[in-house]
Amino acid sequence: MMISTEENASTESEEIDSTESADGVHAPLLFLNVFVIATCGLVYELVAGTLASYLLGDSVTQFSICIGLYLSAMGCGAWLSGWIDKSMARCFIEVELAVALIGGLSAPILFIAYAKVAWFQPLLYGLVFVIGTLVGLELPLLMRILREGLDFKDLVSRVLTFDYIGALAGSLLFPLLLVPNLGLARTSLIFGILNGLVGFWGTWLLRPVLNTGVTGLRIRGLATLLILVAAFVFAGWLTDLAEEVIYQDPIVFSETTKYQRIVVTQSPTRVQLFLDGKLQFNSRDEYRYHEALVHPAMASAVARQNVLILGGGDGLAAREVLKYDDVKHVTLVDLDPHMTALAKQFPPLAKLNQFALQDARTKVINQDAMIWIEDDPATYDVVIIDFPDPNNYALGKLYTSRFYRLLARRLKPDSIVALQATSPLFARKAYWCIQNTLAASGYAVHPYQITVPSFGVWGFGLAKLQPFSTPNQIVGDPSLKYLNDSILASLFHFPTDMARLDTEVNRLDNQMLVQYYERY
């Protein structure tokens, strides 16, 4: 059958439109785009997982859900790319601009939504899925644009090489440089701007395979970049706006460090510290908590010259320890140098802790307590453990039998240990898991509890490597606001609804404590 010249030309035109040959396109520059796309995609994933763990707690669960959802969404995006047969270059640019706008604005949107929207989790997971789908569309479209200029094996190997290198760059930059220096909101926005630049630049780079409407694409690309740049400039204001709704009192300090989000609020009657959105103390009643944490141990101590505080970066436990004249050395080990610097230099906190971290007797060490305690050669008369509640596995390791056995090496035969152990009323099984883990690790343990109005009933533990009696008298004259001899003796009695429970021992390989804690 004969085909006319016009029909043949029409068929060839359709084939060119369908395949969009990469002739005339600078392939090396497109591979640079692959690197940027991969870096941006991984950063959006990390932003979502970090925000979820900051705001919802349980970092392992949140990261697992976000990563699994993101990867499955990328698969959906890759599948959807198979339905695109024409105008692939235009689709690629449109997808880039959409990723830039949605991914870049994701962190500010989620901060604001957490303060105002009851269905924060569906919004979070919905954004993760949408961003993952768009990212999943990017590489298949770009590979199909490039396929006419390269052998298939070269195309796949080069694209995947740049993709994996970009992912590595994102994974290293995110915790080491971006979050500590820019914060989550500005990090997502800066990578949104990078995605927007890829899309905007693509209108020139892919010009040989774009037919019409280039001006419209460039206008949309420029608008996207302007929105993201404006959001970047006002990112601090947006985050503050969201947090002003979350917190009752005015925010006087906020910072995202490598390890946590620190927020300090202040009103005429109180100062409050929040880490990752969770209240750490209220100045109106924190003295109850810190007196109960420190003074039973000091009353039970045979010697008090050398004291170790693990956690307690706010300096409030150190304040109580330093009330004793016979204390010669206080070593405070806290992971976050920004927290201890704040406690030293920020007037509301420094005044509240009575400048304890500036005292000549105090030595501050910023290191992971579990690593530090394994290497430290010293021994201590008194150990005060003031870690945050075990709401994730990174914290849960500090309540394991492994940790308590490492701690035993730093104790003398008659040394005393006191630790905060969450609420025996609201997290009863978690509380007794801590006590039972201490006992299983070779300690004689006396649990005790107090009431702190900001937190309710709160629990502690007193432990030694040999049997001992509970204290019934405050020693020295530490000028306490709450504790006295009669209250001290009563702390070790538990009502029926907080009585001992049998639990599993918290070990590194099971982290049962975190599971118990999550259930309350």
Image (cartoon, rainbow, N blue to C red):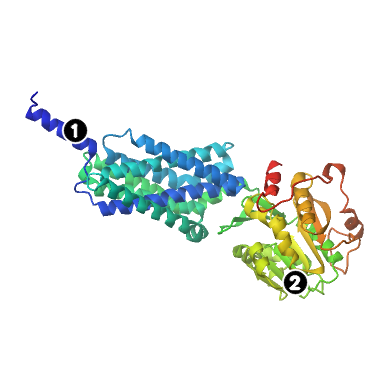
- Nearer to us in this view, 125 or 486: 125
Residue 352 appears anywhere in the view: no
User: Residue 506 at x, y = what percent?
Assistant: 71, 51
Residue 345 in sight from this viewpoint = yes
Q: Nearer the viewer, residue 454 or 433?
A: 433
For the C terminus, the image quarter is: top right
What secondary structure is found at the residue carrying circle 2? loop
Q: Amino acid at mark 2?
A: Thr
Q: Amino acid at mark 1?
A: Glu
Nearest to N terminus: mark 1 or mark 2: 1
- Count of labels shown? 2
* Residue 27 as seen in the image, left or right of residue 233: left
Tell me what residue is drawn at x 82 percent, y 52 percent.
450
Is residue 366 depicted above or below 231 in this figure?
below
Q: Tell me the residue that label 2 is attached to.
A: 379
283 and 431: which one is in front?
431
Q: Secondary structure at mark 1?
A: helix
Please give the name of the residue rendered at 51% of the width and 52% of the height, measured from the top-left corner: 184
Q: Position of residue 89 (x, y in %)?
A: 27, 41
* Quadrant the N terminus occupies: top left
Graded by Cα atoms within 10 Å as few (under 14), some (14 to 19) or many (20 or more), the crowding at tag 2 reads: some
CA distance for labels 1 and 2 = 81 Å
Residue 317 location, x and y as percent?
Answer: 74, 63
Q: What residue would you read off at disc 1?
A: 14
The furthest residue to the top: 1
Q: Can you say whether 130 is above or below 260 in the image?
A: above
Locate residue 345: give its quadrant.
Answer: bottom right
Q: Is residue 76 left or right of residue 33?
A: right
